[in-house]
Amino acid sequence: MTLVNWFESMPAGSLRGLVIATTDLDGEQARLKSAEVDIDDVKHAPWGRYATLWDSEDNGLVLQQARERTNL
């Protein structure tokens, strides 16, 4: 939760950057879209995949699936 007011994109009292881990990002994204939740397409990063969603008060949350580790 943002407790300061110097970030224009994060008004005091807002919630941004909360990360929720999942092992089935595609399934969760499809379930949320079918429930008419505002969620972005899945994006890829070196550490895994993620999709950002917003609640009715424009708080942003990140649904994230980490890359599987392989034993070397």
Image (cartoon, helix red, strand yellow):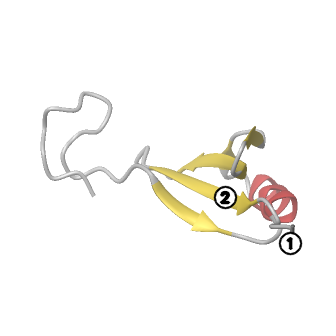
Disc 2 marks which amino acid? Gln
Query: Which residue has dot 1 on it?
Result: 71
Taking the spot 71% from the left edge, 70% from the top edge, the residue there is: 22
In this picture, residue 1 sits left or right of residue 30: left
Residue 27 image offset from top left, x and y in percent: 87, 64
**Amino acid bearing label 1:** Asn
Residue 44 lies in quadrant: top right
User: Whole-percent x and y of residue 46?
Assistant: 72, 43
Mark 1 surroundings: few (<14), some (14-19) or many (≥20) residues within 10 A: few
Tell whether 14 sits left or right of 70: left
Give the CA distance from mark 2 to mark 1.
22 Å
Query: Which quadrant holds the C terminus?
Result: bottom right
The 10 Å Cα crowd at callout 2, few under 14, some 14 to 19, many 20 or more, is: many
Tell which residue pokes out farthest to the front in this image.
72
Location of residue 30 by image quarter: bottom right
Residue 70 screen position, x and y as percent: 86, 67
- Residue at image x 64%, y 68%? 21
Disc marking residue 17: none
Q: What numbered label is drawn on residue 64?
A: 2
| In this picture, residue 57 sits left or right of residue 27 | left
Front residue of 59 and 26? 26
Q: Nearer the viewer, residue 45 or 28?
A: 45
**Where does the N terminus fall, quadrant-wise?**
bottom left
Q: Left or right? Give the position of 2 relative to 39.
A: left
Give 18 or 71, whichever is nearer the viewer: 71
Looking at marks 2 and 1 on the same chain, the residue that comes earlier in the sequence is marked by 2
